[in-house]
Amino acid sequence: MSEQALRLGTRRSKLAMAQSGQVADAVTRVTGRPVELVEITTYGDISREHLAQIGGTGVFVAALREALLRGEVDFAVHSLKDLPTAQPEGLVLAAVPVREDPRDVIVAREGLKFADLPSGARIGTGSPRRMAQLNAYARTHDLSIETVPIRGNVDTRIGYVRSGELDAVVLAAAGLTRLGRLDEVTDFLSVDTVLPAPGQGALAIECAARNAELIAALAELDDPITRVAVTAERSLLAALEAGCSAPVGALADPLADGQTVKEMRLRGVVGRPDGSALVQMSTTGPVLESHDQAMALGSELAAEMLAKGAAGLMGERAH
């Protein structure tokens, strides 16, 4: 390959720039080519509405994808949990690198852990998924909490705690890790308490299908264990016909032998944001042969969840 710089399309947020910078370094290592970041503003970045109101699905990725298709950038980096489940024509998911910790965390005042929050604690999150599970947990453990819808970047969210407006906020461990701010976490939420969003902690490297040489080079960064896990999680999301702002959690635990995944446990949850109803189920199955098996595992679990009434718990349906 020539030494001409590759153009990496990225959102402008601190987190997006941090994770894109890390991918850029990795791409330079495998291609020998310099990578320049091209900042692109998405609708999700400029809208002040809550994600559920603006549709959630694809609001952070559409502008990046358009730039790819127009040839303005060579590849783009997304938080995988922001990607719609349908892959658009002309684009390829070239690599899913090794996943960061998929768990949610809280940043609370006075270093408090979740279990030690006072009665009536105000917990901020922009995610109906987190609200549903936190409120359901509070109901079953006789806790009194109030989930408060918020938007904004990491600084804005943690600022609500620092100012005393909120007792705690919920964030993704992966984002804080990539920002070098994991020391601000006061507690990690067990996945038994809050299942993460499908694909949480993973990144997606996408490029135009016409660029076969670049696709082959980026494939060096693909982690097969991460890819098979997020394939199952996203298959569940797609089969539920839910957008990425719907109250759906999913986590696949691959049971790996070296780099070969032989079996996987997949957990899924759907709930009302007020926590009044929750459908939570899991299944285990083989995924040795192909991604088709991971897809099947997700759709099978979704069918079981729908049979238990999951559809009625999702406010948003994808179109």
Image: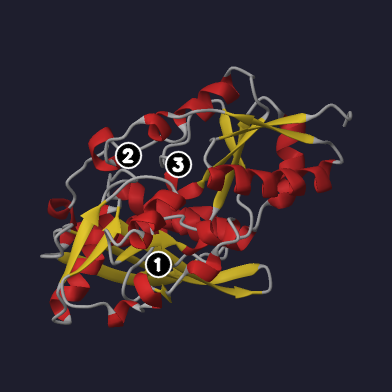
For label 2, the crowd category at 10 Å Cα-Cα, with few meaning under 14, some 14 to 19 and many 20 or more, is many
Query: Residue 162 location, x and y as percent?
Result: 38, 61
In the rendered image, is residue 255 in sight?
yes
Helix or strand or loop: what does disc 2 sit on? loop
- Ranked by sequence position, the earlier of labels 3 and 2 is 2
Pointer 3 residue = 83
Work out how far the residue at label 1 is from the one at label 2, CA to CA, in angstroms: 24 Å
Work out how far the residue at label 3 is from the one at label 2, CA to CA, in angstroms: 10 Å
Work out how far the residue at label 1 is from the one at label 3, CA to CA, in angstroms: 26 Å
Asked if residue 269 lies left or right of residue 224, the reply is left
Q: Residue at x 38, y 45 (%)?
A: 152
Q: Quadrant of residue 36?
A: top right
User: In the image, which is nearer the foreground, mark 1 or mark 3?
Assistant: 1
Pointer 1 residue = 107
Q: Quadrant of the N terminus?
A: top right
Q: Nearer the viewer, residue 3 or 308?
A: 3
Helix or strand or loop: what does disc 1 sit on? strand
Pointer 2 residue = 56
